[in-house]
Amino acid sequence: LLSVTAAVTQRSSVKRQRSVLPTMATVHYLEVVSNERDATCAFYEALWGVCFGDEVAEMGKARTASRPDGTLVGIRKPLADHDSPIVRSYVAVEDIEAAAKAAEAAGAMIAYPPTKQGEYGTFAIVILDGVQHGLWQG
């Protein structure tokens, strides 16, 4: 018990850096990569009552829909051999360059550096412990 108390005390005394993420992270974009894009769109349309539009070239040919809470959802097919089915959330950040650097400093690997996505904004993907995390500024 004494060693646990000492560890907690030591951890709480470490000066913390100011977070580059908002206190309450907001999912800006939910990306679903599926071999069966249209069937997956139909699934989410039935689940959420949204309507997916035509594919958008700037979003990797994703069909997109907006949820009532403002979250943009995009469903697309894999774009390359190394691209596989996944559900990836992108949290909104104010400064994507700083957020990507902070993620890297925390041990994440930058899979995609900050990249402009047409007029939709800028995204980055980082991987920590095998889990992909998306960042979005826009």
Image (spheres, rainbow, N blue to C red):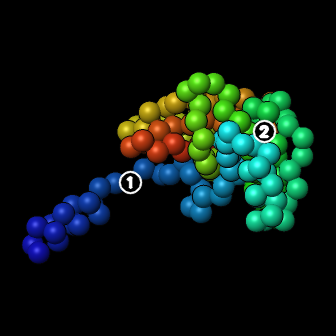
Q: Quick check: can you spot residue 90?
A: yes
Q: Out of 123 and 39, give the one closest to the viewer.
A: 39
Of labels 1 and 2, the one closer to you: 2
User: In this view of the protein, can residue 106 be seen by the observer?
Assistant: no
Q: Which residue is mark 2?
A: 62
Q: Residue 31 location, x and y as percent?
A: 68, 46
Q: Is residue 44 above or below residue 95?
A: below
Front residue of 74 and 81: 81
Total marks in image: 2
Q: Marks 1 and 2, how far apart in space?
A: 39 Å
Q: What residue would you read off at disc 1?
A: 16
Residue 121, placed above or below residue 13: above
Q: Are marks 1 and 2 in contact (CB under 8 Å)?
A: no
* x then y, percent, for residue 12: 29, 63
Residue 25 lies, in percent from the top left, at 60, 58
Mark 2 lies on a secondary structure that is: strand
The image quadrant where one finds the C terminus is: top right
Amino acid carrying label 2: it is Ala
**The N terminus: image quadrant:** bottom left
> Which corner quadrant of the image does residue 33 belong to?
top right
Point out which mark residue 121 bears.
none
Camera-nearest residue between 65 and 43 = 43
